Image (tube, coloured by chain):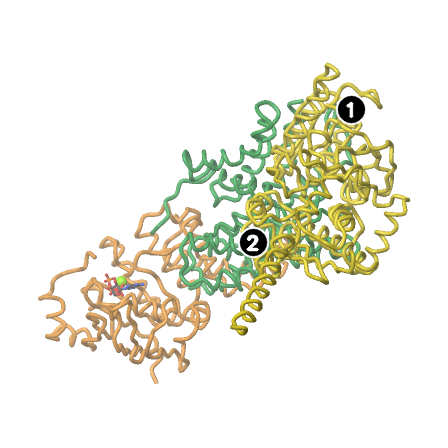
Amino acid sequence: MAFFSTEGLSISFGGLKALADVSIDVQRNSISAIIGPNGAGKTTLFNCISGIYRAQQGRIIFKDKEIHRLPPHKIAALGIARTYQNVELFAHMTTMDNLMLGRHLFLKTGLLSGATLFHSRSRSARDEIANRDRVEQIIDFLELQAARNEFVSNLPFGTQKKVELGRALALEPELLLLDEPCAGMNVEEKQDLMIWLKDIQEEFGITCLLIEHDMSLVMEISERITVLNYGRKIAEGTPDQIQNDPQVLEAYLGGDDRAEN
Amino acid sequence: MLWQIVIGGIAVGSAYALIALAMVIIYKTSEVLNFAQGDMACLSTYVTFMLLHGYGFPFWVSLPLTLLFAFVLGACCEFLFLRRAKDPTVLGLIIMTLSLEMILFGLLSWKWGSDQRELPFPITSYDTFTIGSFYVSRLEVLTFVVALVMMALLFLFFRYTKTGIAIKATQLNRDSARLMGIRTNRILMGTWGLSSVVGAVAALLIAPASTLDPYMMWDPLLKGFSSAVLGGMTSLPGAAAGGYIVGIVENLFGTYVSIEFKSAVAFAIIVLILCIKPSGLLARHYVKKV
Amino acid sequence: MKKMLLWTIVMALVIAVCAAGAVTAADAPGVSDTEIRIGQWAALTGPAAAWGAVARGAEAYFKMINDEGGIHGRMIKHLVFDDQYNPARTVAGIKELVEGPGVFAFVAGDCTACALAARDYLVEKKIIWMALGNAWSIKPDRHFFFIYPNYLDEAAILVKYAVETMGKKKIAFFYQNDDYGKGGLKGAQQQLEKYKLKLAAEVPVEPQDRDLKSHTMAIKNADPDVVILWVNPTSAVIMRKTAAAMKFAPLWMAPSTLADPALMNQITGGLWEGTIFSCLAELPDADIPLMKKYRAAFEKYVPKGERWGIMYMAGFGFAEPLVEALKKVGRDVTTDKVIAELDKMTDFKGIFGHITFRPEDRQGQKEVFIAEALKDGKSKRLSDWIKADR
Ligand SMILES: Nc1ncnc2c1ncn2[C@@H]1O[C@H](COP(=O)(O)OP(=O)(O)OP(=O)(O)O)[C@@H](O)[C@H]1O
Ligand SMILES: [Mg+2]
């Protein structure tokens, strides 16, 4: 049994079939990618997995458990975190606050900032300090120190994407869904991201499933690739297999580069 | 004279501020203008009345029971009523709260009739002392202090508690909040409960200075709403400040300009603010993402 | 041939009987050999449900009359319906009664808007109406009899008492900003003109206003000896509480709409004591035989838990003149005869003041008396009935 899989997932909006019978398998501790032209249904697939949308048909299985009927907060608690294509942060909060919200499920006591308000050895203080430490590690890891106390809405887009990644990591997920993590990043940032993704996989043992238009990054980093077009899976395999798949080439109209989308 | 009016304005403004806060708490999370706020608060006050009068409980028992009732009432209104709407429009939501208002009002008049009653309150509104040459009633002082305490509690709650921060997160981005493991449905219910408690506190402070009857909260609700609009509908400090401003301006207007049109001041404020600065006086500039 | 004649006679008889029946129906709708049907609309539910007490009062009164043997062998059937203070429902309900079982007369009926809506239909159907409200707000008709004195007269009497009996000159007037309040204001102004005086302050209030600090300040600054409260109970309570907080203690006066000392005492938390008010009807605790009889009827026919007060008494009072006229008319009841009898009524004294109707003047009561609110919701009568002379 796969670590994570979908079986025959379908959803349509009005007459439009955004997903049609999509089945994918993801192995534990791997990096897999989903690619496909605009409007292929990639983000919709993520929305179904994270519980924002409810698939009309099909099943989603995570660690041998059916999750397609669960609400988003339960799916998050089971260990699936995600980032968004367009960044969905808590705009009027600082980077720190955003990451601390990622720790929501781990906070045991109702009081936050207990450490500053109360006796530092109190239970709430210890609980909070432990969680803050975790967040600090993530800040260090993603080199977000400069942005720590900034309102996220004032940060450049690339940094916001990092904050969002950090927030997802704060949930300590087992499966991380990344929707176009490179979009809007410069070359240098992309290089960093590639290294971080490798670290996330290898050091934290987190399974990654990413949607990405940057083919060079996808081909370099992922072990398996699934290709969607018009809501259907048209191919899957290793980067080599995909690069030589005639159907994929046709879908991309002879390699029309959409990396900038 | 001027200062007497200002003091009076601040006192009544405290009550408006509480109602405005109650409305804003709901508006921020649910994006609903809750026109049933007044009647929800009124119902809670009748519960106090019933506990004190009907069951003979002492005030210090009735008060927490009332606040508990107010919380449950608010939560139920959200759960049984607003949640049932599937993808409602703004207009649809307004119609829903208006009909909730009518249901509650009907319930009030059916259960207690339209007779005015006296809410037995530990402090009477005419128990006064003087500061210099000004009269200040103990109830006014109590209202003022309670409002400040409520504001401080709300501030601490939203700033320093797990639930408070979860509410803020839900207000800012509901889907993201759900992905953080926050049960946003519960949060919505909770904010309605919280808002209902704040409203009930306001009504409990308003009732002793007037009479307890089903219409009790109509006028204060209008004033509270105009305070909230003045504060931009989404800002808690804005709503609080709005309450004091409405209270003071209204009383000054009534004294120095026209007593006949005093009640119209609140309307005028709503219209003016919506025309000139819909984001409110204190609102930070921010454009909502679509 | 004989058969023909027989048929003709039968036919003639049938027609005669039908015609006779039709004539009776038109002359006295709602009257049969055994009963007289009297209708009433009232808000039994909804925002003005307190008015239901008027209907239950009338109900108790009619039951009392029936238990005494009815009127010349006929029982009174009281048909009440709930209009929820909604004019559309009032009209629909009246039609249902009039065109269904038939109704001889209506008594009371709340809500000025409802009454206005009902008016034209009642005129059209020529139905007697012992109307609540007064000829000042509802256009009179041959079939309508108004009992309450109009607001102008009542305010004038209050001012007269303040000036002539109590020797006060500085009077402030606090009034509801509508026809009711402005009527009172006009009456007070007219009466003061007779003494070459003017009101010290005229302060209007919107009935729903809950914060009356600036109103109270405006009155207080005029420094009056007397403040007349021409407002609804809620505004009166707020004004009294606010004034008490400002240590402002003039002599307070109030019209009959606030003449329920027990209620006012309770909802002002005792502040009502000392208020001078005018009364349209005997005090609820008056020590007179009629009041005792009515109280006994109230206790007998009205479910427990209700409070004997002016609303119930009004139910009795509105029905009294009609019952009186029906008794005088005798067994042969028609609308015209009852109207003629009512128009002869001179100084009829029931639970209200003296009532006199004339074809050209259907404002029955023109007098009030003055009372003072005492501790614990009790009251003391200060004057005899006083007529207006503005
Ligand atoms: N909530 C919705 N209501 C209606 N249509 C939707 C909704 N969500 C997605 N769609 C439609 O489903 C199709 C797939 O959209 P989706 O966002 O999944 O594409 P995508 O593969 O992520 O594209 P891109 O590369 O541009 O992000 C699109 O045609 C989109 O318009
Ligand atoms: Mg997408």
Label 1 and label 2: CA atoms lie apart by: 41 Å
Towards the viewer: C134 or B193: C134
Please state which amino acid type lies under the numbered disc 2: Arg
Q: Are marks 1 and 2 in contact (CB under 8 Å)?
A: no
- Which of the chains bears the disc numbered 1? C
Q: Residue at x 74, y 34 (%)?
A: C255
Dot 2 falls on a residue whose secondary structure is: helix
Please state which amino acid type lies under the numbered disc 1: Lys
Question: Percent x, y for residue A50?
Answer: 38, 69
* Residue C180 seen: yes
Question: Percent x, y for residue A73?
Answer: 45, 67
Question: Percent x, y for residue C381?
Answer: 87, 36
Question: Percent x, y for residue B119?
Answer: 74, 48
Towards the viewer: C313 or C37: C37
- Labels 1 and 2 share a subunit: yes
User: Would you place residue C317 above or below residue A252 in this image?
Assistant: above
Towards the viewer: A101 or C289: C289
**Quadrant in which the C terminus of chain A appears:** bottom left
Q: Which residue is mark 1?
A: C160
Q: Which residue is mark 2?
A: C89
- Which of the chains bears the disc numbered 2? C
Towards the viewer: B126 or C169: C169
Q: Hue of chain A? A: orange
Dot 1 falls on a residue whose secondary structure is: helix
Q: Judge from the rendering whether residue B206 lies leftward or rightward of residue C64; answer left or right.
A: left
Residue occupying the far front of the picture: C1
When asked about the image quadrant of residue C212, the answer is top right
* Residue C301 seen: no
Q: Hue of chain C? A: yellow
Disc assigned to residue A174: none
